[in-house]
Amino acid sequence: NHGTPAAIREMSQELARRGHTVHVVTYPLSDDIPISGVAIDRVCQIGFNRVINVGPSYQRLIFDFLLIFKLMQVVRRHQIDIIHAHNHEAALVAGIVGRLSGLPVIYNAINTMIGELPSFGFIRPRALAVGLAKLLDYATPRVADTVIADTAELHRFLLNIGVAPERVTTINSGVCPEMFASGDASKVRGRFACANEPLIIYTGTFDEFQGLDYLLAAFRIVHQHDPSAKLLLVGSTINPTHRSKYARMAKKLGVASRVTMISCALEELPDFLAAADIAVVPRPESAGIPTKLLNYMAAGKAIVSFEKSATILENGKTGRLVAPATAEGLAEGIVGLLADRNLALELGRNARSLVFRRFDWRSIVEQIEGVYDKIRAEQVANGHRLHRRPGRATAL
């Protein structure tokens, strides 16, 4: 329901629609999100905790180990041709199974560990987390035969750490714009804001690297300019520790009465975005394209973001980009768009138009198929026997 899982769901559905047989090998979850035409193969549940939070944990380490056996089982049982792995841990699992099975592995690089792992606080001291993050960033692309970089920035990062240029291609993440075409603002607006109250929204996880401390500090400034403004922080599931942390921060900043934190299901997300006036990406820097950014664009929202987290946008044309990353700059961007509603509407329209031109999953998957075709041609040239049906992929 967030980030990479949502992207895998949408990509897999489009691959299936185009005739591929797709198996998604993943963790156990409490609820299955509907996904049509795709087989879901889950590892067994261990323990009683059925909520898997973002970031490292002992529970995830166990599931990652189990994924090796589950993926090998799926590969053997269903005559898989290509393993397409997303994120570092999945790529490492895929690398092991790929070597054992002789199958080609694609690593879909959407982030860097150095930009996220130290912020979780799971590995201490912090210097150890930084060192491990650098090691993972270096080693992970090397277990794959082909690397798909989410952005030009990630492409450059991979080349700078020594990955061979011929093994790296850039294909952006995508979004399903139709999903956001029929959002009903009335289902949300009345619950959280009056008709004339500006509603600012953030959607995504509440982890430290997402920059919610910047957003709350910025909102205090926005509130000083317009006391009627409200801030809505929306997550798929909200870690109680994170909820408490940001509730305390909002209270300390004097804006607790104007800030609401709430969970929403995937199918409700278009309604929440339809109700908002401004959508914010407060993450200081992201090597990949945040899924929330694509969702905001597809919903036609006026976006305020730190520049290094929205490199696909053009300042003043498809969004309001802020640099350097400061709460004051973020607040200035929000206040400016609240004061100029015509500009806000124009930015939202332009952002949605950009989605249809460059980030629709249909065109993205065509590019991914090109990578699959190249790999299959190389297999044939090297004398490997392929399975008869032309499209088999496993996504992690």
Image (tube, grey):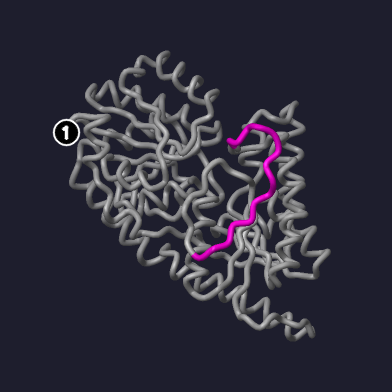
| Residue at figure coordinates x 46%, y 60% from the top left | 174
Which residue appears farthest toward the left when viewing the image? 196
Q: Nearer the viewer, residue 368 or 314?
A: 368
Q: Amino acid at mark 1?
A: Ala
| Residue at figure coordinates x 44%, y 19% from the top left | 247
Q: Position of residue 105 (x, y in %)?
A: 71, 65
Q: Nearer the viewer, residue 333 or 355?
A: 355
Is 305 placed left or right of 123 in the picture? Answer: left
Q: Provide the residue span drawn in magenta.
A: 37-51
Q: Is residue 281 visible?
A: yes
Residue 48 drawn in magenta? yes
Main structural element of the magenta stretch: helix, strand or loop? loop
Residue 208 drawn in magenta? no
Label 1 Cα crowd, 10 Å radius (few <14 / some 14-19 / many 20+): few
Query: Which residue is labeled 1 in the image?
Result: 195
**Relative to 277, does residue 7 appear above or below in the rendering?**
below
Is 153 placed left or right of 376 in the picture? Answer: left
Task: Determine the image quadrant of residue 121.
Answer: top right
Q: Position of residue 176 (x, y in %)?
A: 40, 59
Q: Is residue 156 visible?
A: no
Q: Nearer the viewer, residue 231 or 170?
A: 231
Q: Position of residue 103 (x, y in %)?
A: 75, 70
Q: How many marks?
A: 1
**Relative to 89, does residue 252 appear above or below in the rendering?**
above
Is 19 placed left or right of 121 in the picture? Answer: left
Is 383 placed left or right of 181 in the picture? Answer: right
Q: Quadrant of the C terminus?
A: bottom right
Question: Which structural element holds mark 1?
Answer: loop
Task: Determine the image quadrant of residue 94.
Answer: bottom right
Which residue appears farthest toward the right when viewing the image? 100
| Residue at figure coordinates x 25%, y 27% from the top left | 229
Q: Position of residue 338 (x, y in %)?
A: 23, 36
